Image (cartoon, coloured by chain):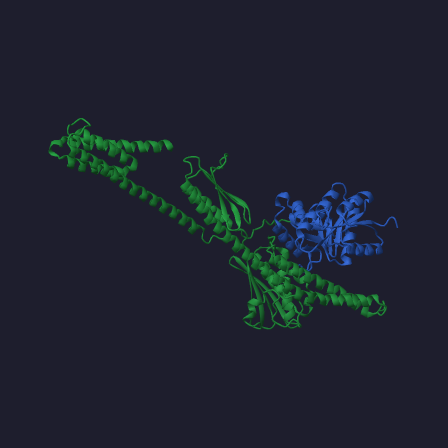
Amino acid sequence: MSNAPHILVIDDEPQILRAIRTILTEKQFRVTTASRGEEGLSLAAAHEPDLMILDLGLPDMDGVEVCTRLREWTQTPIIILSVRDSERDKVAALDQGADDYLTKPFGIEELLARVRVALRHSARAQGTQTKIVKAGPLTIDLAWHIVKREEEEVKLTGTEYKLLAYLAANHGRVLTHQSILTHVWGPADADHTEYLRVYMRQLRKKLEANPERPQYILTEPGIGYRFIADE
Amino acid sequence: MQNSSFLSSLWKYLLAFVLIASITAILFVWRDALETTLVALLYLIPLGMITAQFGLGPGITSAVITFFTFNYFFIEPHYTFTVHQPADAVILIVFLIVAVVISQLVGRAQAGLSAATAREHEATQLYELSTALAGLPNDHAIAQILAKQVHAVAKGEYVELNITGTRSFIYQLPGVARPTRLPELIIPIEAARGMLGEIRLWRAEPPISPREQRLFQTFASQSALALERAWLAQAESRAQVLEESDRLKSAILSSVSHELRTPLSTIKAAASSLRSKDVSWDSPARVELVAAIDDEADHLNMLVGNLLDMSRIESGALKPKREWNILPEIIEGVLARMKNLAAEHRIEVDVPESLPLVPVDYVQMEQVFTNLVSNSLKYAPPSSVVCIRARQEEDWVHVQVRNQGPHIPLDDLERIFDKFYRTTDAERVTGTGLGLSICKGIIEAHSGRIWAENVHGGLAFNFTIPLSWDGAKPPQLPIDTETE
């Protein structure tokens, strides 16, 4: 059992801690909890958990700041919890290095899915990079820059490919507008969300069976995009 | 300044002397033809003129000098100050008395006139100030007018107002550097309830006269009245806003506690029966109960979200984070999320591909579509069509969400966007009655307009949003076309 992933949960609401602890323990995770930012930071340093779940609304310090301070010394995945309508804080935390987010109230499947993606991603970051990403009928070969749909090559423009490759390499994770724009277009264009909107639409038309109900390239309203690949 | 006033009074004396000398010269030429009494009378003319023109001082001085010249040149024996004839002595004395009395009378009339002019001037300035102050809505505007007026009237170097009343602030005359020394004059602005602040005036030369000081004191009391009036008006409107929001709060409480309790009751009932041993683990009822808890929790979450949105709109904290967005993407996202709710209806989307990018807040616009569509789904009969249509109309985008629901009485078409307003009785349809007013708040925050209209066979919600944003038109994007 000691090999089970260790998760640190930082939240000031005891009911939430209780619920998350119950569910995660049930799913064979080891769970440590903290109810304040400072406490969370010192527990993180002491236990070096495999994953952290961090509430943005802590009483003693700003969740975004906790994120920043953690990222000074560790790359352990961080999933942030926040309430609706705090897109600005979510985006700030994600741009400060948080890996994913959940909006309260959330379903438990959602929580577990995020936890799985984050753990897999951190395992991948330590090992070798995935070369081939599969999502339904789509195959994206990141080494050879080839995108296939049902074994048929899809022609993408240079920018479209760069965009898709970045999404696919981080499949399962939410990517903020700013991080995608900076990565694909460069820091000078980090504010041009409209580029993303237009290119995502083109990509969906070329890749999705029904571009109006995308299954693989998902919009995270107010935050960014997420690429869903096969597990 | 002082130097020049001394010079000007010296001039007056000099001119008076010159005038007397020239009159004396003229009379001297005609001396043999003129009688002594006539000379005395003729002498009175310049004396009157001098007093009228130059004031009492030069007048009296000239009278005395004339007395001597008259005696010296015109009364026998000539070129002496002695008098031989008793009649001449009488003439001389009468002349002196008349000259002095005339000078004094004319001088006093003159002084009275200039005092009246000064008073009239003050009255005009005071009138100008009170006219300017009348109806000013806030203390800053009052301070500005007062400082300007004091500065102009005093011809001072600098004016500063330190307002310490309900809201304290310092108003400094713009465009002029504040002198480093202490102000020459400080006048308190006092009202019945105490000190409201003070006027600080810098003017080294000429020194501020008591008359000016009195004038500025009147200025101060005028502005004290204006300040008090402005503050009272503000307090009153604040009280009105408070009363309004109080009423809103109790409306929210009564409407919401009912709405919140419904899902809570379901959740409580379902959860407690799951805990009891009455429901076996594999019964279909268990699945039902769990689903009910999940659905009602979502419902509760939505209600709370609506309340938060409403309070944000009410407090003016709803600031759209505008970005250039593709309208169909927003609509598709909403419809994908609502597909369970919309299972009984057909939703058609009619938006041309050529529609330009729209400058909107993605999340807020999702909210608008969610509320308009869910409102349509609530009231329109099952298996009817809800149509979402968008068109560019010059510099605007016009969106219409049209359903086949019942018509709304003409009087209610505007009121359905009011908080907690519902056309049908609350029993039939659930909701806080906030959905449409949230839409209104969001669309108006985007400088748009929203309205409802009865159309053939149904009801249509319309809204328009400007396509330009801070003057910027929808961007044309550099699309690369060559493939890898």
Judged from this view, the residue extending furthest toward the top is B79
Judged from this view, the residue extending furthest toward the left is B33
Left or right of B442, for residue B336: right
Residue B265, percent from left and from top:
75, 67
Left or right of A179, for residue B148: left
Residue B355, percent from left and from top:
57, 58
> Which residue is at 35% across, 47% downward?
B120
Q: How many marks?
A: 0
User: Chain B's shade in the image?
Assistant: green
Judged from this view, the residue extending furthest toward the right is A1
Residue B8, percent from left and from top:
32, 33
Question: Which chain is blue in the picture?
Answer: A
Judged from this view, the residue extending furthest toward the front is B86
Left or right of B317, for residue B226: left
> Which residue is at 85% across, 70% downward?
B278
Q: Look at the picture and state if B234 lies above or below B93.
A: below
Residue A79, percent from left and from top:
75, 50
Query: In this rendering, does residue B466 appear at all?
Result: no
Residue B272: quarter of image: bottom right
Left or right of B148, for residue B85: left
What quarter of the picture does the N terminus of chain B occupy? Answer: top left
Query: In this rendering, does residue B129 appear at all?
Result: yes
Q: Nearer the viewer, residue B186 or B99?
A: B99
Q: Look at the picture and state if B170 lies above or below A28.
A: above
Q: Nearer the viewer, residue B274 or B453?
A: B274
Q: Look at the picture and state if B355 lies above or below A145.
A: below
